[in-house]
Image (tube, grey):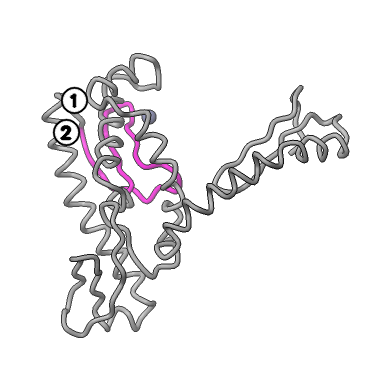
Amino acid sequence: MRMRRKTLAISITDGVVTVKAPRTTSVEYIEDFVGRKSDWIQKKLAEHSRKTAYLRSVLDYASVLYRGEQHVISDTSEFKRIKCENGILYLPQKYAEKDGGKAAVCAWYKRTAAKELEARLNEISAATSLAYKTFRLTNARTKWGSCDGDCNIRLNWRLVMLPPYLIDYVIVHELAHTKHHDHSAEFWRTVGSFYSEYKAARNALKTYSVLTSLYR
Ligand SMILES: [Zn+2]
């Protein structure tokens, strides 16, 4: 990327290396810069593939992530509806035959999310005295949640894939926006007063960002 900037910068997001350089910088200089950073780049990319390796079978739709735990998908003629227990998601044959079960699993996720996320939102809202107006699930591409100026909260249905402590973090984050509609220091103080480990949760959440591309 050539930009109107004064310095060279290199960043890695979701396994993609980006170098931002001033328009006038020569290709040789950029190559040399990247070369000098190659150890760091290799380390970051290895880290990324290690993290996504854990999610590989989820990304391949061979297993599902539910509340932070992987469940392998197993076709069954025993049940009529999807059932998720003991590390296995039982997928009725009729769904499996259609599209590998993708649509049915997606619908199951959304049903589960509608119930579980709203219940948890209400529990945390009551415990923190942070009130919201309406709740809806979203299919957002990058965001886990949002809270608009009227205190309407939206949560990405894929949140049910995450470990409960991260679901709680996102809910606390959005509820804190009912008091502060920005990411000011006061906002983070409010988050921290209800969820002290929020910095660790924010970082952990990044490792799951790849999941927002699933079931599109
Ligand atoms: Zn926010």
> Disc 1 vs disc 2: Cβ atoms closer than 8 Å?
yes
Q: Is residue 46 above or below residue 88?
A: above
Where residue 82 sits, quadrant-wise, is bottom left
Residue 99 percent across, percent down from the top left: 39, 77
* Residue 141 highlighted magenta (yes or no): yes
Residue 58 percent across, percent down from the top left: 39, 62
Q: Residue at x 19, y 38 (%)?
A: 121
Q: Is 183 displayed left or right of 9 in the figure? A: left
Q: Amino acid at mark 2?
A: Ile
Q: Is mark 2 within 8 Å of ligand 1?
A: no
What SS does tag 2 mark? Answer: helix
Q: Which residue is mark 1?
A: 130
The Cα atoms of the two marked residues, 1 and 2, are separated by 8 Å
Ligand 1 shown in quarter: top left
In the foreground, 6 or 48: 48
Residue 210 percent across, percent down from the top left: 46, 51
